[in-house]
Image: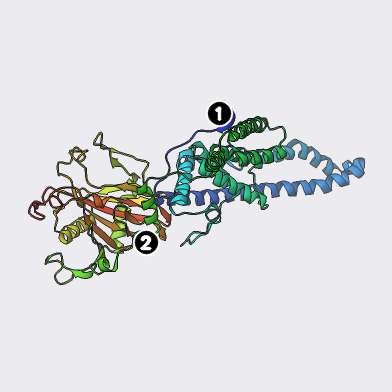
């Protein structure tokens, strides 16, 4: 495969590769399944084209073999051969007519059907932004789940049904994408993996010179000058005339000489050099670290005393007539904030109906912009969603009624049922569902007050990853098909409960479908009365 053209620019006296980045990508596994069918159709079309070409070549081959025997006989005794009037006639006929027909056969383009199909299907193909987005998702999964490049490259992930691996060229592509984001940490990791696989003998179109070029600069940017020089020397062994590498080598030697000179006058220079040359991962905020730990299942463990306060029970919705004779199973997931899970609360048939209604409308999920109060896409929410109203389907209406019966809250002022499907590395980083005091107009256009509570259905099992986590308190809630979790975002006083800050962890392996209902304050005045205490 040919490499894309790379432009170079100058920074800190160095020539460095530069290419453009893309920011969007397919964010729904549900939509990506259509691409599988598209590719299958193209493979069928390609095989038809191959058969047509093989049939054409077979005809040409038979013609050649027949004429080879004929001309071999004729050239041994041309006059005797042509002395037969039939042979003379057939020679005239062949050269005047049949060779022209053969020429037409040779010139006949058998690819028309395949090219036509390609042209039609191409409008549904992912673009450069999709490819870049999928690559960023892999890097995100690598960080969140502490995966080393070799594990990811070999496809050794938990719960996988269809194992796959990354080629050296794939690793090189991931490194390039990290490079365009000035993410030199991941650039180094993936360029080293590409180089390792080539050194182990993998046959690839990836070029070691290209890889070493990116790798040496990424290492330099992280402060490891010695390693950058070693890599550049290796590059020059492969291509002694490499202009940029020769220039960089001179620059590295100049910098190294200056550092040695400076070290003589500084007693702490050795310690400082060690700090500068240490390869570091990007620093994250404490919340980010807690979030990633919870996603890996490394969260806080409840004390036995707190665990004793968590129960499971049969719940009748506070004597709701629909559930007195047939109560539902409910269990406590966490105590503060109180998070409860309802088991077997949505059937497989209902799930499939909701998914089929949502699929044609899935679009990039949005968030409320606190400055404008409007919905907008955000890099920290990677999924596709659709909204379903109760009047569209008896199933959606029945689900809404079920939520009202079991929560005791009025759903007539709630937002529509939102259905979300998470794509490659799909996630929703830590956020609040309710509007804070610094964003008073967050739900002004709805006219129904703040989001008092959240009801979240899990409509699929997830092989690995995809938990809902609460970094403030250390809770992790794992997806389980057919269940739903519920929590209040506001205290009865109307004040926001900041411990409900939560996130949807990236899906490592599998396909995550959820649907949620955000219930609002209006209509709950007598269903959940206000208390005198601000935090009650």
Between discs 1 and 2, the one toward the N terminus: 1
Compute the Cα span from label 1 to label 2: 50 Å
Name the one closer to the observer, 442 or 305.
305
Q: Is residue 305 above or below residue 208?
A: below
Residue visible at 22% across and 59% down in the picture: 338
Q: Residues within 10 Å of mark 2 (few under 14, many from 20)?
A: some
| Quarter of the figure with the C terminus | bottom left
Could you say which disc has been placed on residue 12 in the image? 1
Which residue is tagged 2?
Answer: 461
Tell me if residue 1 can be seen. no
| Quarter of the figure with the N terminus | top right
Name the one closer to the observer, 412 or 122.
412
Tell me if residue 139 can be seen. yes
Name the one closer to the observer, 430 or 328.
430
Q: Is residue 243 above or below residue 292?
A: above
Name the spot of residue 497 as percent of width and height, x first. 21, 50
Name the spot of residue 239 as percent of width and height, x first. 71, 36
Q: Is there a contact, CB below 8 Å, between mark 1 and mark 2?
A: no
Q: Is residue 55 above or below residue 403?
A: above
Name the one closer to the observer, 375 or 311.
311
């Amino acid at each position: 495969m040919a490499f894309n053209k790379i432009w170079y620019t100058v920074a800190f006296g160095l020539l460095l590769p530069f290419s453009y980045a893309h920011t969007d990508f397919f964010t729904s596994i549900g939509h990506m399944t259509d691409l599988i069918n598209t590719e299958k159709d193209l493979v069928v079309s390609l095989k038809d084209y191959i058969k047509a070409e093989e049939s054409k070549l077979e005809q040409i081959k038979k013609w050649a073999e027949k004429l080879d025997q004929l001309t071999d006989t004729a050239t041994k005794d041309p006059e005797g051969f042509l002395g037969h009037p039939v042979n003379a006639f057939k020679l005239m006929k062949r050269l005047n007519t049949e060779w022209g027909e053969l020429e037409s056969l040779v010139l006949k383009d058998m690819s028309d059907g395949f090219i036509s199909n390609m042209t039609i299907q191409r409008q549904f193909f992912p673009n450069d932004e999709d490819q870049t987005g999928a690559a960023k998702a892999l890097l995100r999964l690598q960080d969140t789940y502490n995966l080393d490049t070799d594990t990811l490259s070999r496809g050794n992930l938990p719960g996988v049904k269809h194992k796959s691996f990354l080629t050296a060229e794939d690793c090189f592509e991931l490194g390039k994408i990290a490079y365009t984001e000035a993410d030199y940490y991941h650039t180094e990791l993936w360029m080293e993996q590409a180089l390792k696989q080539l050194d182990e003998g993998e046959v690839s179109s990836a070029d070691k010179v290209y890889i070493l070029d990116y790798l040496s600069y990424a290492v330099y940017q992280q402060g490891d000058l010695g390693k950058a020089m070693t890599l550049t020397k290796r590059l020059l062994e492969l291509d002694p005339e490499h202009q940029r590498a020769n220039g960089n080598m001179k620059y590295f030697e100049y910098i190294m000489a200056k550092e040695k000179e400076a070290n003589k006058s500084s007693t702490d220079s050795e310690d400082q050099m060690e700090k500068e040359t240490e390869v570091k991962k990007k620093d994250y905020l404490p919340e980010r670290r807690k979030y990633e730990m919870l996603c890996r299942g490394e969260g806080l463990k409840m004390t036995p005393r707190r665990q004793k306060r968590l129960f499971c029970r049969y719940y009748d919705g506070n004597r709701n007539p629909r559930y007195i004779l047939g109560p539902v199973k409910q269990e406590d997931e966490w105590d503060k904030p109180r998070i409860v899970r309802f088991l077997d609360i949505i059937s497989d048939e209902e799930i499939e109906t909701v998914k089929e209604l949502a699929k044609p409308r899935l679009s990039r999920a949005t968030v409320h912009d606190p400055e404008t109060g409007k919905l907008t896409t955000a890099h920290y929410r990677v999924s596709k969603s659709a909204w379903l109203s109760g009047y569209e389907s008896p199933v959606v209406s029945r689900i809404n009624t079920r939520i009202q019966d079991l929560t005791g809250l009025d759903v007539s002022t709630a937002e529509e049922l939102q259905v979300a499907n998470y794509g490659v590395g799909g996630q929703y980083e830590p956020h609040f569902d309710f509007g804070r005091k610094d964003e008073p107009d967050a739900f002004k256009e709805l006219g129904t007050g703040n989001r008092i509570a959240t009801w979240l259905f899990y409509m699929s099992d997830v092989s690995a990853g995809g938990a809902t986590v609460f970094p403030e308190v250390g809770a992790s809630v794992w997806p389980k098909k057919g269940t739903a979790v519920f929590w209040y975002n506001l205290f009865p006083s109307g004040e926001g409960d900041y411990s409900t800050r939560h996130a949807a962890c990236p899906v490592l392996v599998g396909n995550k479908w959820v649907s949620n209902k955000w219930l609002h304050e209006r209509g709950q005045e007598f269903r959940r009365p206000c208390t005198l205490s601000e935090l009650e």
